[in-house]
Amino acid sequence: MFPIVPSLLSILAGILLWFIARRWTPASSKSRKKLPPGPRGLPIIGNLHMLGHTPHRALNNLSKKYGPIMFLKLGSVPMVVISSPSAAELILKTHDDVFSNRPRLDAVEHFMNSSKGMAFSPPDFEWRKTKKFSIQELLNTAKIESFAGVRREEVGALLASIKMAAAGGEVVDLSEMVGELIENVTYKMLFGFSNDKKYGLKSIVHEVMALMGAFNIAEYVPFLKPFDLQGLYKRMKAVRKAMDNVVGEIINKHEEDARNGTKKGNMDFIDMMLSSKTLSSAHKLDQENIKSLLFELILGAIDTSNTWIEWTMAELLRNPGAMRRLQDELEANIGLDRMVEEKDLPKLQYLEMVIKETGRLHPPAPLLLPRESMEDIEINGYYIPTKSRVTVNAWAIGRDSSIWPNINADDFIPERFIDSDVNILGHDFVLLPFGYGKRMCPGAKLGLLNVKLIVSNLVHGFDWELPKGKSPSEMDMEEAFGLVTAKSKHLLAIPSYRLLC
């Protein structure tokens, strides 16, 4: 008999005993409290089988039956799904203190010390210290503006590359080219370099992103963890080792340059983090802080911005009228003799509408990062037990026809924001691409700047058409669910240069 067979028999026996105990054990006072409505689940897996390939869509369909505050069991994990602005406000604002914790996720525990970072840390002193440092030192307006030259240089290189392709009538992979641009800008800001041949950091980051976005069934059915049926834990250990080696080497090189006075150019984020060590103990970051924060910044910057730009360009290609109107605005404000600069962006009102409309239809993270209730609480008459995961379905809110009346909520129509004061930073709880409250993305300003600058230059510099004579209605708009929800297939298009310079 193979060694695994007795283990499997023990597991099956344990499952049977658990099911019998659940069926015959009298309900506790807590279980008699009124949970939010939700679909009935199966033994062991609960409602996991209902999520499908695009959980945000599946959960939206379920919420239409069970309501905007819905309860599910994902394996052993209680989950509350929020699908309306009023319910989102209760979680993200009214009771933000109760729901400001994050659940412990296996991928996060493998890749970074979750208690030392910002996005996934519990709301304790360590988290407040790291968040305060990030906002005041790394993501403040002056620091963001100090890297304007880096963004200008990288965007200029992208436009030059596309211009060469346009001269030959070539098809370009916009998803890949924009992704590389975002990576280069991010690495220059964080590490001071973009040429990654020495360290191989890009391949490590891509593996981290794939693993962070992977559906790990053992996280919801914990007794499966020792078996690693999907091979995820083996991959996590390998990439963590590689990540520690590379990031440690980069940090050591920065420390050496600081000691020797050989640092050149603008201070990058690692320089700023290392300089924090000279501050009081209340503000200094140790190496675990630095490593965790670096990878959170990478994960937050690269995939999110790239995905937003990809969907924006896809929607503009599908809607030539919107593309033309945006080009007209750019011509009127910029002219055809230069590229768009950051100083131009505040004047571009239609561009703002386009970016909002994409954020409504295609929020990069359609299910906001889950929160965890820190105590038992009653919301709208429903009992939410402590340690429940709570996630806001931003995709469902963005497509709700009762919130976006008069014009089809599934259509890309930037004009719906004319004379609208809806705020892209979530203040109205109808547009939540960055979340809201204590856990709102602190890099929202930098992310929006990158998206607006790149989209405006791609649209201003080139006319675009689909390859092989495809019509806009034939464009593939399928989604690939992961850490963020990108297009399932890369965006390919043929550019034609339209500037005079």
Image (cartoon, rainbow, N blue to C red):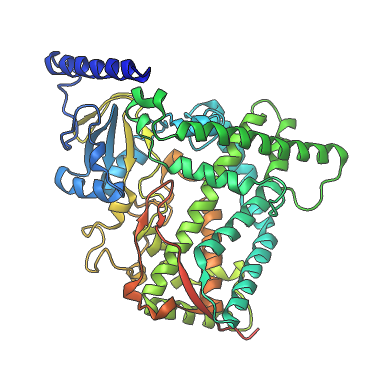
| Quarter assignment of residue 154 | bottom right
Locate residue 470 relative to residue 42 in the image: left or right. right
Locate residue 25 relative to residue 242 in the image: left or right. left
Q: Is residue 283 visible?
A: no
Locate residue 483 relative to residue 282 in the image: left or right. left
- Direction front: furthest residue: 1
Q: Is residue 101 visible?
A: yes
- Name the foreground residue: 99 vs 488: 488
Q: Which quadrant: the C terminus?
A: bottom right
- Name the foreground residue: 341 vs 246: 246
- Name the foreground residue: 227 vs 125: 227
- Direction right: furthest residue: 260
Q: Residue at x 49, y 33 (%)?
A: 108
Where is residue 127? Give x, y as percent.
53, 31
Where is residue 228? Give x, y as percent.
41, 29
| Quarter assignment of residue 103 | top left
Q: Residue at x 38, y 17 (%)?
A: 3
Q: Is residue 46 above or below residue 357?
A: above
Where is residue 49? Give x, y as percent.
24, 39
Where is residue 404? Give x, y as percent.
26, 61
Locate residue 129 relative to residue 321 in the image: left or right. right
Q: How many marks?
A: 0
Q: Which quadrant: the N terminus?
A: top left
- Direction bottom: furthest residue: 500
Q: Residue at x 32, y 15 (%)?
A: 6
Q: Is residue 331 above or below residue 290?
A: below
Q: Is residue 182 above or below residue 48?
A: below
